[in-house]
Image (cartoon, rainbow, N blue to C red):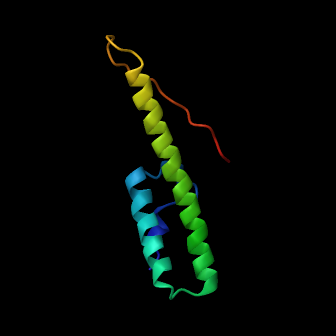
Amino acid sequence: MHRDKHVTKKTKGVDFEAAMSELEGIVERLEHGDLPLEESLKQFERGVELTRTCQAALKQAEQKVRVLSVKPGAQAMLEEFEPDQQD
């Protein structure tokens, strides 16, 4: 029942698609409303973590696009972007 066993608590190594997929599953389970309160709270907490992970991934992707877009006429060079640590 727990599909998130392969995803560590530290979501740093989780890719965007895996995080979104897990988040969609959590939303679906919560929408059914048949989980006990304690499990609902755990799932909600995990959903918040995954949402933050997805937001950070999107922010990093946006920054990479901006870096590539800022250099018109020059060869596109991808610069590494270090996102702010929220922990």
Q: Nearer the viewer, residue 8 or 82?
A: 82
Answer above or below: position of 56 versus 48. above
Residue 81 visible to an observer of this rendering = yes
Name the spot of residue 57 as percent of width and height, x first. 47, 45
Residue 78 visible to an observer of this rendering = no
Q: Nearer the viewer, residue 70 or 35?
A: 70
Answer above or below: position of 20 versus 73. below
Query: Which residue: 56% across, 73% down?
Result: 43
Numbered label tally: 0
Q: Nearer the viewer, residue 62 or 9?
A: 62
Query: Which residue: 52% across, 52% down?
Result: 53
Query: Which residue: 43% across, 30% down?
Result: 64
Q: Nearer the viewer, residue 10 or 58?
A: 58
Q: Which residue is situated farthest in the right direction here?
A: 87
Name the spot of residue 74 as percent of width and height, x first. 33, 11
Query: Which residue: 47% across, 68% down?
Result: 4
Name the spot of residue 56 as percent of width and height, x first. 53, 45
